[in-house]
Image: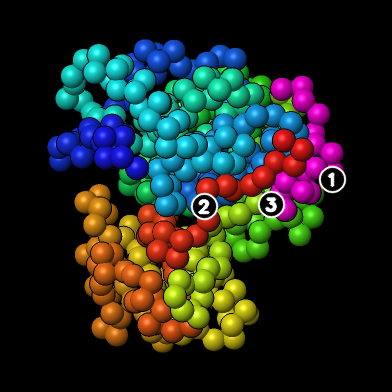
Amino acid sequence: MASGTEDTFFREWHRRVPGQGRSLERARSLAGRLGLPDPNRPVLTIVGSKGKGTAATYASAVLAAAGLRVGTVTSPAYRSNRERIRVDGRAISEEELSRLVDKLRGDMRRLPRRRDGYLSPSGLFLLAGALNARDADLDVLVLEAGMGGRSDEVALFPATVVGITPIFREHLGVLGTTPAEIAQEKAGVAVADTRAVVSAPQSDDVNVALAQTVREATGVGVEVETLPDTGSGLPRSLVPGGLTRISAEIGYLAALRMLTACAVDAPDTERLRATLASISLPGRLSWHGVPGSAAMLLADSAIDRSGFAVALTTARAHWHTIDHAVVCLPDHKDMEGAIIELGDLPVTFVRLPHDHLHFTRPLPEAWNVIDAADLTPALLAGLGDRVVALGTVYFIGRLLDLVEADTERLFAPSGH
């Protein structure tokens, strides 16, 4: 991506001062100048602690299978920031992104300078994605929230349907002091016009918080629909394994509720199967060859003990043994869970160069520690033929780039 384009999205974030947060009001002002939100564009919003990208992908695929043209905005990207904005599963082109940047820049210059907060990169990509949906006259918009809910820029776009993936202690102390408070923040994207809210199974305290928040926001008109223990009804062959299954089914159910809200028929079985079978989820238990070698990489953006366990079990079921694990977990992720699950495996720990991510916790003495700049295909190949990569999405994205993974299209709509 051209440096000028990159700078437009990240300039204010790079120039923020200590203690300064994102400004939802500045983003709201910019959205207004851009003519957003568009009241004619129904919005499906995905919130939660984990699995939001999977849910957004499945929701988008189901809507596309029903014949709708779908704009999807997710964060972060895998290999290119173009991937944050997609139409019918495909990343927009460099030319399309440049066109959106030109529109953003003009109105950003007209915003009054304020010291109360910055325009966040994820928020600006979201505005660009909504602008693209309007200009391309897309039928529906699927938005993945960033860290929060009512405090996130997705809250600027009234949600017709809300999908909620599992909520746990991620961002404790940032979004709330308990999981229930985090749930209230995330469910705060529901509004009076919201037609349906679909949630993954949650703990009892989270369920109570979600129900109360949604009831208050919608005027007692909407009840939270929880994914049944038996699943959404999708055949197991059409949903991913591991912990991503629940998020995929949340995306599917949320899309069905959106189709009902839009008075659009659900896709026929053949078209739905073909579209869902085409879904690719890079970095979610995905397998990749390492260029120039016989080595294979299993990449998974696991950040807690349960995720680590599933990834390692999957690798051992396929390979019987694991030669090496490459791990990247900033201070706020579950390092204790990783240490327990990785056990005696040889581990290389990778530190990222992002100043908002901290790597200060003590690590096992046996672990090798490197900087992200040291990662190369040759280094990966030198770790063995069977390598597992675990950690934050930013890190997994770097590895996907190293192994030249195909991340341009997440699904291919049947019949489009």
Residue type of the residue flagged with mark 1: Glu
| Gap between marks 2 and 1 measured at Cα | 25 Å
Q: Residue at x 38, y 30 (%)?
A: 98
Of the pair 147 and 139, the residue shown nearer to us: 139
Q: Which mark is residue 218?
A: none
| Gap between marks 3 and 1 measured at Cα | 13 Å
Q: Which mark is residue 407?
A: 2
Q: Is residue 272 above or below residue 400?
A: above
Q: Quadrant of the C terminus?
A: top right
Q: Secondary structure at mark 2?
A: loop
Q: Which residue bears the numbered disc 1?
A: 270
Residue type of the residue flagged with mark 3: Ser
- Asked if residue 179 can be seen in this view, the reply is no
Q: Which residues are magenta?
A: 262-277
Q: Is residue 151 above or below residue 58?
A: above
* 160 to the left or right of 356: right
Q: Residue at x 50, y 64 (%)?
A: 300
Using a 10 Å C-alpha cutoff, classify the residue at mark 3 as few (fewer than 14 neighbours), some (14 to 19) or many (20 or more).
some
Q: Is residue 176 one of those drawn in magenta? A: no
Of the pair 242 and 207, the residue shown nearer to us: 242
* 320 to the left or right of 120: right
Contact (CB < 8 A) between labels 2 and 3? no
Using a 10 Å C-alpha cutoff, classify the residue at mark 2 as few (fewer than 14 neighbours), some (14 to 19) or many (20 or more).
many
- Asked if residue 377 can be seen in this view, the reply is yes
Q: Secondary structure at mark 1?
A: helix
Q: Which residue bears the numbered disc 3?
A: 278
Q: Is residue 243 above or below residue 86?
A: below
Q: Residue furthest left?
A: 17
Q: Residue at x 63, y 80 (%)?
A: 317
* Quarter of the image where one finds residue 259: top right
